Image (cartoon, rainbow, N blue to C red):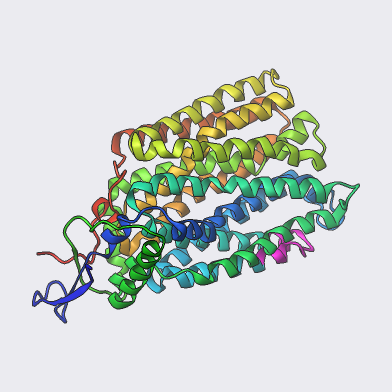
Amino acid sequence: MATTRISQHTDHAVDQKGQVFETDLPARLDRLPWGRFHTLLVIALGITWLLDGLEVTLAGSVSGALKDSPVLHLTNSDIGLAGGAYISGAVLGALLFGWLTDRLGRRKLFFITLILYVSATAATAFSFSLWSFMLFRFLTGMGIGGEYTAINSTIQEFTPARFRGWVDLTINGTFWIGAAVGAVGSIVLLDPGWIGGDLGWRLCFGIGAVLGLLILVMRLWLPESPRWLLIHGQADEARQIVEDIEKGFRQHGHTLPEPTGTPLRLHARDHTPLGEIFQTLFVAYRQRAWVGMTLLTAQAFFYNAIFFTYALVLTEFYGVPSAHIGWYVLPLALGNFCGPLLLGRLFDVVGRRVMISLTYAISGVLLAISGYLFQQELLSVTQQAIAWMVIFFFASAAASSAYLTVAETFPLEIRALAIAVFYAFGTGLGGIIGPMLFGELIDSHDRGNVFIGYLIGCALMLIAASVQAIWGVASERKSLEEVARPLSQAHD
């Protein structure tokens, strides 16, 4: 069996101690078939997107109840600000925990960030004023932002290369299972016939805390990423994890092929200096950085602008009672989940460059068309819901591919931080400005003003599609080390 070994090397430019790790562990992970291990990994980690979907949907679904709350008395602008607080927390959490994930390990951080999320979302249920509600939403966002960096990097590093695109998109699509859970929860808990009132919206936020505790237990069996262990000089532990995974496959009757390619030669490091991080992100990989930031900014504005305020559109322009908002989330959730699920394989077969550009462009054009019909008052509330469902069938695949892009096109040593940096830039630009802008546009009670917001979203998606078509990386079916050479890879 191929193993990881240490060879003595005297190249002081590589490592002062002269030790270079030669390993085929990444190739051994990439040659694995899909199995029970991968399914359990996806469930335990990928459920993060479900939690984010739950939080975003609850924020929209309970907005009417928050305005009617005898304690909070929120306005439309307050709700937009609360959405901005959530996104601001996600940005800060991504940067802080992304840096720690690369430094301390994937496993430690995906426990820390989940505990923060559970605590903060539970605290939201006990909000007693506008500032307390915004603070708890900010902390909830920090937990979710940190989860994105730790989880995306872990899943990428365990998933075989030929499945990576479809798996990543499908996992991101589970955001909409969370949206559906949030919608159903709000339908029941906000209904005056069941609970309703000030208690109803508080119990809605308790859903996330309960789910988070269940996920915490599910993650206990997950190992650390062998790729992270290798570059931090823990080759024996990395090898043991891979051998245990391989043993599980053999016990279930799988015959594993020999890994292909030349073994990697890596030198260990305990951290990556900030100077090297910035040089790698913004000099050596500046073209990829531009692509990643553009994709994430466009989808963040597109999604957050609409989904933090969609309930306001339904109540202000279509007269939908706040307790019934959840019913309109369900078809949206269906379209958003089916998009990555049904289109995901094409990102591995047709290729990243074509599919990412196509889904971004289609999403933008459809939003402009439906926005015009909305402005002209040609859509009933049911037709509006159907239009959004079709738009986000494509937009969900597009948004998911943005996270796939930044996760797989940067070196292993800075992968989590790269996800964090571009998530922060993109979400900060698009995710904070979007909800605040749309909150003000809706407050004007003018459909024409809201249409202008939709046109901005369309323009950003078309710009992102063009950037991806020109500078995107064709990373389908390639190992992570082939897509982006590790910074710790030894030079021959």
Residues shaded magenta: 120-134
Q: Main secondary structure of the magenta part?
A: helix
Residue, x 64% and y 67% (percent of image)? 213
Q: Is residue 187 above or below residue 485?
A: above
Quadrant of residue 206 within the rendered picture: bottom right
Residue, x 67% and y 30% (percent of image)? 385
Inspect this view and state whether residue 420 appears. Answer: no
Q: Is residue 306 above or below residue 185?
A: above
Quadrant of residue 120 within the rendered picture: bottom right
Inspect this view and state whether residue 374 appears. Answer: yes
Quadrant of residue 9 within the rendered picture: bottom left
Q: Position of residue 384 (x, y in %)?
A: 67, 27
Q: Quadrant of the N terminus?
A: bottom left
Residue, x 30% and y 45% (percent of image)? 475
Q: Is residue 45 above or below residue 112?
A: above
Q: Position of residue 456 (x, y in %)?
A: 52, 32
Determine whether, in the image, residue 14 is placed left or right of residue 221.
left
Determine whether, in the image, residue 393 is placed left or right of residue 291.
right
Residue, x 9% and y 64% (percent of image)? 492
Q: Nearer the viewer, residue 441 or 27?
A: 27
Residue with the most extreme right position: 193
Q: Nearer the viewer, residue 238 or 208?
A: 238
In magenta stretch: residue 309: no
Q: Position of residue 439 (x, y in %)?
A: 67, 41
Q: Nearer the viewer, residue 246 or 12?
A: 246
In magenta stretch: residue 126: yes
Determine whether, in the image, residue 295 is placed left or right of residue 313.
left
